[in-house]
Amino acid sequence: MSLLRLHLADLCSRPLLILSALAISLGVGVVFTVTSILDGFLAEFEHSVRSFSGDVVAQPRSGGDWEKYKTAILGIDEVASAKPRLDWFGLIGRRGARTLDDPRSSDLSGLLLVGVDQGDRVDIDLALFESATNAPAKQIGSGEYNYPPIVLGDAVAQKLGVVPGEALEVVSFAPPSAGPARPIRSTYRVAATHAGRRWEESLDRAFVRRTDLAIALGLPKGSKAFTEVIIRGAVGVNPETLKSQVADALFEANLPDGILPSVLSWRDMGGIFLRSVEDQRATLTLVFFFIILVAAWQLVATLVLTVAEKRRTIGILGALGASPNQILTHFAGLGLALGAVGTSIGLLLGVWITRNLEVIESWLGGGKRIFLPEIYQFETIPVAYEMESILRLIAATLTAALVFSLVPAWRASRLRPTRTLTR
């Protein structure tokens, strides 16, 4: 208890010790904020990719029989579902616009038409399937139309200036399997718009029914055409393990035509962008951690000064029977206590910053947005609190504080009571 009272007395009598704790807290707050934002970014990016591409994607190189693919893939115990998808690129614009006759026009938007079956993407099923089948025919002049539905991202809908119910026309080229290469034009009705988890997804993709897209491309009615298979694994299954199992199953089934299709995990679909974010996270965390080391290094100077001022007190403790180990423990414990106080304040500061990012953004930008979605991919800055990252930060900070306090603590333990009391 006496050493605890000495800790408190030293903290109250030396403001520099408090300042050292505050310096550590600033470093911890910065590292916590950066780590939480990047963890949130990675978690949101993963959720976005996996919600669109599943855990594993199989891409046949020369087409194939969907029933054979379905049998081979669903024969894997770890597979929860496998859905065919037909993707095709096109230029989209308002129906009847003259710009549709000139593909060089800036008024056209190039995007990926994603042909899905019911149940492929739950968040657009209602707009794409249920509401579309009950939609009444619209009237234009003396004619009626009830075009197949299309779901646009909010960003591209805003760019084109369209709202649900309006008609859009798509210009593309027919696939080789539909005969000679030729331009095709098809019309769709905007059934709904969706925000998309990422700004890029909202800008460059549109969802249609797979059967409607197959007909528009000139494929036979009732065609089972697909360009990829979206595979989702059971809960807890490692996507990389599932990727290997799918590749093996397709190879054993000799699909297609003895040519192994491309089998990609969600990490492969994330590509260089995902890996660059992970590398940036590791680099920034290391760089900002040096801020904590600099702050913790101040403990050396501060505790050395404290030892110099407390020489007489240390001598009295030694005369009263305190062993060198007890004195060393006192000053090392003082440094550790400062690290703990600084870490606690820093974590609270980091939580406050991450929960008020919009307010801070407004302060920094003078009321204007500085974290633009077209650059950072998301409308709002995602944040995630990963317990593993937090525990690593706490352990690293306390370890640094303890290590840097050992030198002055060792010097204090080496002082002889007789010499300190006679000076």
Image (tube, rainbow, N blue to C red):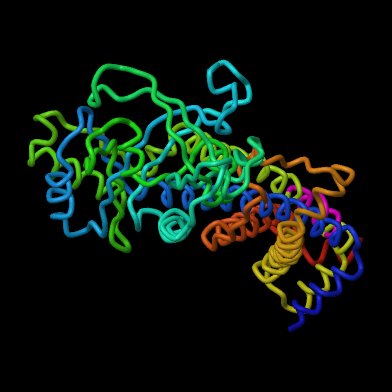
Answer with the quarter of the image where residue 246 lies: top left
Q: What residue is drawn where x is 84% and y is 49%?
A: 362
Q: Main secondary structure of the magenta part?
A: helix
Q: Position of residue 206 (x, y in %)?
A: 48, 41
Query: Quick check: 260 above or below 190?
Result: above
Query: Quick check: 94 above or below 163?
Result: above
Quarter of the image with the N terminus in it: bottom right
Does 301 appear in magenta? Answer: yes
- Of the pair 341 and 272, the residue shown nearer to us: 272
Whether residue 336 is visible here, answered yes or no, is yes
Q: What residue is drawn where x is 43% and y is 52%?
A: 51
Q: What residue is drawn where x is 59% and y is 61%?
A: 385
Q: Position of residue 317 (x, y in %)?
A: 79, 74
Furthest toward the front, the residue is 142
Q: Is residue 148 left or right of residue 222?
A: right
Q: Position of residue 338 (x, y in %)?
A: 75, 63
Q: Position of residue 127 (x, y in %)?
A: 48, 56
Quarter of the image with the C terminus in it: bottom right
Furthest toward the bottom, the residue is 1
Q: Which residues are magenta?
A: 297-306
- Of the pair 217 and 40, the residue shown nearer to us: 217
Whether residue 335 is visible here, answered yes or no, is no
- Of the pair 23 and 300, the residue shown nearer to us: 23
Query: Quick check: 120 above or below 273?
Result: below
Q: What residue is drawn where x is 64% and y is 53%?
A: 400
Does 64 appear in magenta? Answer: no
Q: Is residue 31 left or right of residue 225?
A: right
